[in-house]
Structures are given as C-alpha cells and as structure tokens.
Amino acid sequence: MRKLQSQGVHHITLNGADRQTSIDFWEGVLGMPFVFEQPNLDQPDQNHLYFDPGDGRLITIFTDEKREPDSAKNPNGIGNLHHLAFAVSRATYTQAVVRLDERGITHSGEIDRGFMDSIYFREPLGQLIELASYKFDPPDGTTHADVLHAAHKLRLQRGAYNIADEHLADAIEMLTVDTTGSLSRVKDEG
C-alpha cells in the first residue's frame, strides 16, 4: 500500500482566547513575528492569527474575543498534545532561564536530554512549551535527523541507555566521512 509522504510540518493550529493574549505570548515572549491574520474561514466569529516560529512555517491561533484566558494545565491524556518544542540557538538557550525569570514565568530549569538541552514552561492558556537546543551541528549536506539516526544505531550497538555526546561525535565523524571526499582515502583505496 502506498504512503502519503509528508515533507515537513506545514503549520500547527491552537485554540486561543482573545487576540491580544496570543500576540503578547507568541510574539512578545517567543519573538515569533505576527505575519498575518484573517477570519477563521470555518467559524467567521473567530479570528485566525499566523506567527512565524523562525523557519518560515506557521503557528496559527484561533482567537475569540468572548473567550477568557485560562492558565489551567492542558489535559495530558491519550490523543492530547503533550507539548510543543521550539528550536533555539545555544546563545538564546543560555539566556532562557534569566529571561523567563524576568517575566515571572515558572519553568523547569535546564534539563539535559543527551542530544539536546531543554527548558519547559506553560504558555498563558496552559499548553506546555519546550525550548530545545541541539548539542551539535550536523555536517554540511546532512540533517539533525541524519545525525540522530546514526547516533541511535551506535547507542544500540554499544548497549547505552540513551544517546550521549560520544554517540553524536562518532555519528558526525561517520557522516562526514560518508559525505565528503578525501584524497587520502582515494590513495588508500587505489
């Protein structure tokens, strides 16, 4: 049976409260430019706000001026969204705790995930947000997913519990060798 092959996330849409709450958080806290808005074409009494999370894709929010913000934790059941993770640079990540504290936003503090570092907090409507910073840059011509796939294989071969720096470093070396020519290797192979 043939697949419906995805080629990336097109957009994610969340239900918001009033318009200004969304603008204040998505642009005001996370720095996502507010790029356009229009009515929700399925429910004209709602507005549809569009924000750029930094890669040209979109985070969109349905807003309704009759809805009040509710910061209660969103349900964490089967089929429910657990969290949204946004990539941040290492420089931004190192400033996240201070900047969240300046705003009085409660957060998890820095958490080491082996292949990345994370900080978690809730947006004004209770959705869990993660700021994630990879611990590595992929070699030219490869992706973060390529490195993680190779590091995963190494982790399994070595019986490790999770991906660690050594798996990442070895995966990056392997991918670099596989994708970059070398006169030394040509000589050795000849």
Image (spheres, rainbow, N blue to C red):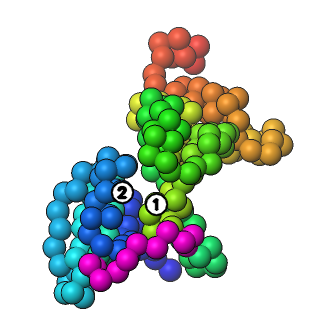
- Specify whether residue 29 is painted magenta: no
Tell me if I can see residue 94 in this picture: yes
Horizontal and vertical percent for residue 158? 81, 38
Q: Disc 1 and disc 2: Cα gap in Å?
A: 7 Å
Q: Is residue 128 above or below residue 117?
A: below
Q: Give the class, few, some or many, for how many residues have Cα within 10 Å of label 1's Cα (few <14, many ≥20).
A: some
Write the residue at 40% across / 72% down: 69
- Depth check: give the residue in front, 183 or 18: 18
- Residue type at mark 1: give it: Glu
Q: Which residue is mark 1?
A: 123
Magenta segment range?
64-74
Write the residue at 17% across / 62% down: 36
Horizontal and vertical percent for residue 162? 74, 44
Quarter of the figure with residue 164: top right
Question: Taking 42 as reference, is 150 left or right?
Answer: right
- Residue type at mark 2: give it: Phe
Q: Give the class, few, some or many, for how many residues have Cα within 10 Å of label 2's Cα (few <14, many ≥20).
A: some
- Depth check: give the residue in front, 92 or 150: 92
Question: Taking 33 as reference, is 152 left or right?
Answer: right
Write the residue at 52% across / 27% down: 176
Q: Are marks 1 and 2 in contact (CB under 8 Å)?
A: yes
Write the residue at 45% across / 50% down: 86
Please tell me the numbered disc located at residue 25: 2
Horizontal and vertical percent for residue 39? 17, 79
Disc 2 on helix, strand or loop?
Answer: helix
Q: Is residue 153 above or below residue 8?
A: above
Quarter of the figure with residue 151: top right
